[in-house]
Image (tube, helix red, strand yellow):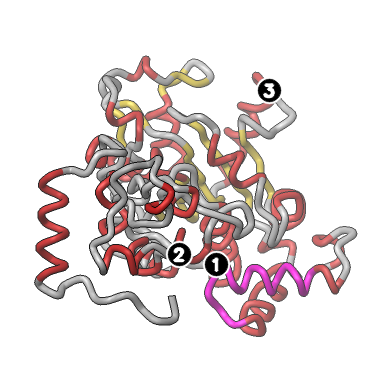
Amino acid sequence: MNELLGDISRRDFMKYCAGAAAVLGLSELELFEKVSEALASSSTKPPVVWLEGQDCAGCTVSLAGALNPPASALILDKLSIRYHETIMAASGYVAEAAYEETVRAGGYVLCVEGSIPIADDRFCMIAGRPFRRTVEEAAKNAAAIIAVGACAAYGGIPAAGPTGAVGVGKVVKNKPIIHLPTCPVHCDHLVGSILYFLATGTAPPLDKVGRPKMYFGETIHDNCRRRSYFDNEMFLTDWNDPEQKNWCLYEKGCKGPDTYADCAVRRWNDGQNYCVDCGAGCMGCAEPEFYSGMSPLYTADSKRSRDIMARKKAGLIPPLKEEA
């Protein structure tokens, strides 16, 4: 284990396991036993191929912000990242040779960041080849496939443009794919999914659109701190009115009632905040309909509004949980 963990002390390792336990929703002891056993064998240090298509590299930036375990420990000690255009030192033919060697050997975790254009391959060419073809090739020998972020999962923002952008599942057929939407991906979702695969050799249980249930089992609305205002129909109508500061943002386009994700509980930036607490409504970036199906972001969609209010009046949206 020391060979893999480098200069990480046992105390730090225990701390990483405790943090990762929260990420995975497992008990600390259970996770410690599984992850420590996996890390004790160099054969379980899985190679990773990370491809980037139509993206802003925001998901890579989000991964770099991981703290439990820190991104440095994950990248250098727990994984063997063979190819990642943004963070790898190699470039050109040397980088492509590393990619080709890893794909031939197989058994790697394939992470795809960014959407795939299908209207015309020329919209995204990497190393002289269409990105679509590279994804199809890399998927064949992958042990696990993770669609990192909203764009890779379902098309995201690029899908609203002219490129015919789609998620990985529209290109790669007959292989299980772990979808980790939100824009960008939450580092806990990504680290947790990789650690789950590292510890168990399988993907975590997924919902009907391919998202891990442990992260996408409840709506933003279920745990929102403004939820009591929704229940009392106190909706913000004037951004400049100090009395409405904490009122529900539903009438300002918040998509929380339709969005399944744990942002309201897990929060972002090491648990500091998330969109709604910043004063911006949820934009629904964890849903397959994002972006085009959720826009305009700051205007309440009339049909969506009627549907949600009808569900509320029919008692289909339960009252706020006391523990939330």
* Label 1 with label 3: CB-CB less than 8 Å: no
Residue 3 relative to residue 52: left or right: right
* Label 2 with label 3: CB-CB less than 8 Å: no
- Magenta-drawn stretch contains 307: no
Tell me the chief SS of the magenta region: helix
Residue 199 lies, with reference to residue 245, above or below; the image says below
Q: Residue at x 77, y 74 (%)?
A: 14
Q: Depth check: 58 or 224 in front?
A: 224
Q: For mark 2, what is the residue?
A: 203
Residue 196, numbered label? 1
Q: Position of residue 76 (x, y in %)?
A: 76, 50
Q: Is residue 163 visible?
A: yes
Q: Depth check: 134 or 244 in front?
A: 244
Q: Position of residue 254 (x, y in %)?
A: 31, 49
Q: Secondary structure at mark 1?
A: helix
Q: Position of residue 308 (x, y in %)?
A: 16, 59
* Sequence-wise first label, 2 or 3: 3
Q: Quadrant of residue 178?
A: bottom left
Span of residues in magenta: 13-27
Q: Secondary structure at mark 2?
A: loop
Residue 41 lies, with reference to residue 181, above or below; the image says below
Give the amino acid at mark 1: Tyr
**Crowd class of label 2 (few under 14; some 14 to 19; many from 20; radius 10 Å):** some
Per the model, the C-alpha gap separating discs 2 and 3 is 31 Å
Q: Quadrant of residue 238?
A: top left
